[in-house]
Image: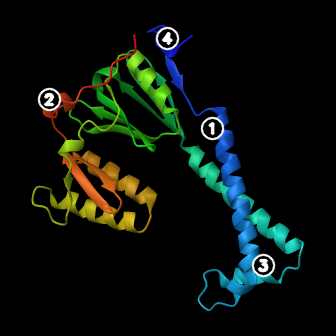
Amino acid sequence: MGPNKTEAGKPSRLRVSTRRVAAMWAMCVVIGAGLGWALRAVSEWAASVDGMPLRDWISVLAKVPDPYGTVLCLLLGVGFGAEVARRTLKDSVAVSVQQDRVIWRAGRKTRRIARAEISAVYLDGFDDLVFLGIDTGELARANNNLNEDAVKEAFLRHGYPFFDADPHLEQYLRWVEDLPELSATANALLKARQKALADNAAEDAAELRADLAKLGVIVRQNDDRQFYRLTGKPAAEVTGAQPDKAPV
């Protein structure tokens, strides 16, 4: 039975497929094993380079004779890959789409959002599932590992305003330091977030994004540049953007 024929009143449940989970683990473990093999191949050279990070540890690995040294490096690489997979999947979102509400779980966090509060739902690239409120502020943003087509079909089936991209893209402006349009607090947070992006501190950048959202400042980035908009009217009133329609 096709997705568009599902009973409208029945909740649609979305979660990461077993196949995708298995693929993620396999990919990370294989890449990790490759890195471990490469580490073994260059360990003697790396141990001789002054200023090499973790030089003492690499020196210990270089002194372990084969085949034990190779096996040890492979195990370290596999362990590293497994940890990357675990961290990537631990906050994967699971969503229950209902007629009157959305319930999503990410890791240990659970959030319930009433249908009446939502003005737009969209996928921000391949990374995040985003819910916007009536004032166009972000109600929630969660890491998305779900099938994009299944997400779109589920929300449209239950009558939610789903967009293929951020419906407010035309409203974003480039941020530079000390903009007079923004408060001193917002400028300080954006400056701190710029540093977090430069340092590849993803968790700090996400926390600062959430802090800015509380101030009514929505932010996105393109490479090392940040763009912002202020919360306001629904997308259709400002840009003429219209949500997608459910298949018939």
The earlier-in-sequence mark between 2 and 3 is 3
Q: Position of residue 156 (x, y in %)?
A: 38, 20
State the separation of the CA atoms marked 1 and 2. 38 Å
Q: Position of residue 153 (x, y in %)?
A: 44, 22
Q: Quadrant of residue 178?
A: bottom left
Q: Who's the residue at 72% across and 71% down the image?
A: 38
Q: Residue furthest left?
A: 180
Q: Position of residue 110 (x, y in %)?
A: 48, 34
Q: Nearer the viewer, mark 4 or mark 2?
A: 2
Q: Nearer the viewer, mark 1 or mark 3?
A: 1
Residue 10: numbered disc: 4
Q: Who's the residue at 40% across and 43% down the image?
A: 125
The earlier-in-sequence mark between 4 and 1 is 4
Residue at label 3?
A: 61
Q: Secondary structure at mark 2?
A: helix
Q: Residue furthest front?
A: 248
Residue 44: numbered disc: none
Residue at label 2?
A: 237
Residue at label 1?
A: 20
Q: Residues within 10 Å of mark 2 (few under 14, many from 20)?
A: few
